[in-house]
Image (cartoon, grey):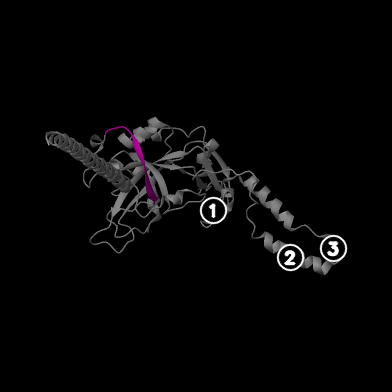
Amino acid sequence: QEVNQEVNQEVNQEVKQEGTEVKQEGVKQELKQEVKQEVKQEVKEELEVKQEGVKQDVPQHLSITEYKYPSYNNGPCVFLPCLVPEGATSKKEGERIKGDSDINEGDVIVSVMRWGLIPKYARDTKLRDSKTINARDDRLASSPLWKPLFKSNRCAVVIQGYFEWQTKQSARKQPHYFHCPGDQPLVLAGLWECWKNGPGKYNDPFEELYSCTIVTRAATKGVCCDIHERMPVILQDEKDLHAWLYHGKLDMLQSQETPKNLGVHKVDFGVGNMKNNSADLIIPLSEYQKKKGGIASFFNKASPKEKNGDEEQGNGKRKAENEISNFVSAPPPKRERVEEPHQ
């Protein structure tokens, strides 16, 4: 009996120890689960904050997939990438009109904005006045519309190139394409505004809309002046960009000459129709006409049967071919694919 009691005591102690170990292991597992849940919650909250910050700069209605494909003929009301000081678009109403002192000079961010500025007091987002697509430099400090924006809402509009119609020494307004060699982007001085929906506003699909305008100046001597009397203010380097965004030094930019690497050439009149959107719209006019003439001549070739005297049938074919060629405005695609950047 004594032996049995000793054995039972040893067994009970082992069972208690095993039970304690099991309980401790269970507590450890519970602690691990709690820590994992806390970490997941912290990461989730951090991501939500970051996503909320992105939503403030990118309109919720805008799908990023719209920028997957090149566009060669943009007009007012298209969305363009703009550079603004970090934090400028997230400030509350009234804070951002204090001037530059409340914005630390540093990084810039990209914010998508619609071309054609909509004043914040407008009742809807319809672009009723095409004059707000550009802002003259000599009116920035005096215009009731531009003055407050010039003080605090400066941006830089990024494009591939721009079209201008020759108004001098030309009976017909000939379109020209201005760009940098190698399709390097052009950075233009601009102003921005944020329109918000609310009481007193018409029914509008936008809850809020960021819009922009491009600042223009008198054309400098040279090719720009020969084509048109006005031109956009071009920010040529990072120094110009920061001088404009953070200090609004327009006088320095106005005194600059036209960038030496700014190229220009004539383009086809088809650019005047906003429905046209082809890479051929930005190639030199001579090259475009050569390509167009090549495909037109292909349709106008006569068949051997026509040459053998079947004049009536041949005339009918040539007439049909000429009608087809009138609708051909672009050559067949090149064999090697060349991806064009956004305009």
Question: Which amino acid, mark 2?
Answer: Lys
Q: In which quadrant will I find the N terminus?
A: top left
Question: Which amino acid, mark 3?
Answer: Lys
Question: Which amino acid, mark 1?
Answer: Asn
- The secondary structure type at the circle numbered 1 is loop
- For residue 147, say whether it is visible: no
User: Can you identify the residue that label 2 sits on?
Assistant: 319
Point out the frontmost of discs 1 and 2. 1
**Which residue is more in the foreground, 55 or 39?**
39
Mark 1 or 2, nearer chain start: 1
Please state the extent of the stretch shown in magenta in the rendering. 104-115
User: Can you identify the residue that label 1 sits on?
Assistant: 277
Point out the frontmost of discs 3 and 2. 3
User: Can you identify the residue that label 3 sits on?
Assistant: 305
Q: Is residue 144 magenta?
A: no
Neighbor class of circle 3 (other Cα within 10 Å; few <14, some 14-19, many 20+) is few
Please report the residue visible at 68 percent of the width from the left and 59 percent of the height from the top. 325
Location of residue 262 in the rendering, given as x and y in whole percent from the top left corner? 51, 36
**Which residue is more in the foreground, 49 or 96?**
49
Mark 3 or 2, nearer chain start: 3
Q: How many angstroms separate mark 3 from mark 1 (CA)?
A: 39 Å
**Which residue is more in the foreground, 305 or 54?**
54
- For residue 134, say whether it is visible: yes
Mark 3 or 1, nearer chain start: 1
Q: How many angstroms separate mark 1 from mark 2 (CA)?
A: 28 Å
